[in-house]
Amino acid sequence: MTGSTATTGGAGAPATSKGRAPEGTNGKGPGFLAGPAGRLLGLVVALGLLCIVGAVTAPERFVDIDNVLTILRLAAVVGVVSIGMTFVIIGGGIDLSVGALVALSSIWATTLATQAMAEDFHWIVMVFTAVAVGAGAGLINGIVIAYGRIVAFIATLAMLVSARGLAEIIANRRTQIVQDRDFLAFFTGDVLGIPMLVIIWALVSVAGWVLLNRTTFGRHTFAVGGNAEAARLAGIRVQWHTLKLYVLSGVTCGIGAVLLMARTTTGSSTHGTLLELEVIAAVVIGGTLLTGGRGTIVGTVLGVLIFVTLGNVFTLNNLSSSVQNVARGVIIVLAVLLQTRLAEGGGSGWLSRLRSGRGESSSGGPVAGGTPAGAVAGGTSASGAPGGDRPGATH
């Protein structure tokens, strides 16, 4: 028993015993499709095929530059909010309240009092108000989840209902018109033909990529999502970090509300209806695991483009909204199934299990129940998490 020690691989790699290759890899490491490059390449191919379908089925309208800009403008709001959602899901959580927070932020930023202050000082007051409201609601989510120990699904579901109701109360169920022309001129303008909404989305995405991949905050996010207990033992303040993740999600909701206010010239309690479903779908399609511990900002951006482009192709081909919803639901399920399979031995381990009909790895070793293929019982598969003690192991 002492001659076999538990080891952990790279990000997302299952723990394996010494000398044994991960399942389905034939000793050559994880399959290409299971790696970040392979997943991103698959998303690029999917987006390319979707564009080809659009160009073939609606050649004159789909390839028109105005239609392309329309896709990008529609993707901007979903894209900005998806950046915050990516952090939350990688960190092992979920936020169902993002659509309601966008509505609440837009309402608060377009009240008569807020717009009067913006007229006296600068339209940046409206932007600050929207971001502050989103951050405040995210702070409440984080406190309830991290320190109140309420399941994220329930806590954010309660916030969804409460924030939407509060938005209706503040606006008295009326749509509020944005009066500040300088605000609208700035956010509806363009730079070198690129809409300002798209530029803001790009800036938020770049900032999110740097934060996730080049800072301690990003490393802690992966660690907490991969194995919260191991992260705690490693000295990470898991509760404090979880709170910050939900504040970050709230901030992106505030920015998304600003973009939606500019695009529609209104603040409304109906803004962001079902936005949480679009955002979660885009993040999942982009390759972020719903169980946490893995995900990329680039994948999320591609997932947003795929999801929005798909809706555009459906609309150009005059498909009903009912058919679109069915197709989107199927795509979400397929995306989750695909990422689950790819997470198991690089996408080939599950095929070998189907062929053999037994719970054994391709190298002949038994698979511990409830653990990734080839993992030693008691170990963890989280990136950077230490393998657990095996029964009978000596120290």
Image (tube, helix red, strand yellow):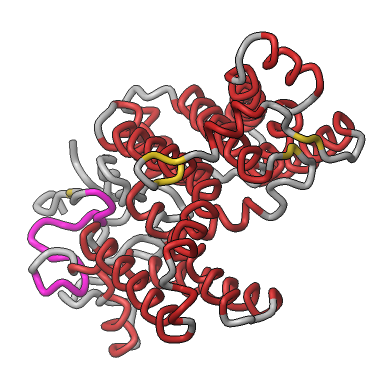
Residue 338 location (% of width, % of height): 39, 72
- Looking at the figure, which quarter contains the N terminus? bottom left
Q: Residue at x 27, y 37 (%)?
A: 213
User: In the displayed structure, does residue 19 sit left or right of residue 153?
Assistant: left
Nearer to the camera, 213 or 54 = 54
- Which residues are the magenta region? 11-27
Q: Residue furthest right?
A: 172
Asked whether residue 152 is drawn in magenta, I would say: no
Q: Position of residue 289 (x, y in %)?
A: 42, 55
The answer to which quarter of the image holds residue 384 is top left
Image height of 70 relative to 358, above or below: above
Near-viewer residue (106 or 58): 58
- Image coordinates for residue 226, horizontal then vertical, percent: 37, 44
The residue lying toward the viewer, choosing from 239 and 321, is 321
Total marks placed: 0
Magenta highlight: main SS: loop
Provide residue 115's location: percent of width, then percent of height: 73, 20
Which residue sits at x=13%, y=49%?
A: 2
Quadrant that contains the C terminus: top left
Residue 329 is at least partly visible in this image: yes
Q: Is residue 324 left or right of residue 361?
A: right
Q: Say if 282 sits above or below 351 in the image.
A: above
Q: Is residue 25 magenta?
A: yes
- Residue 359 in which image quadrant: bottom left
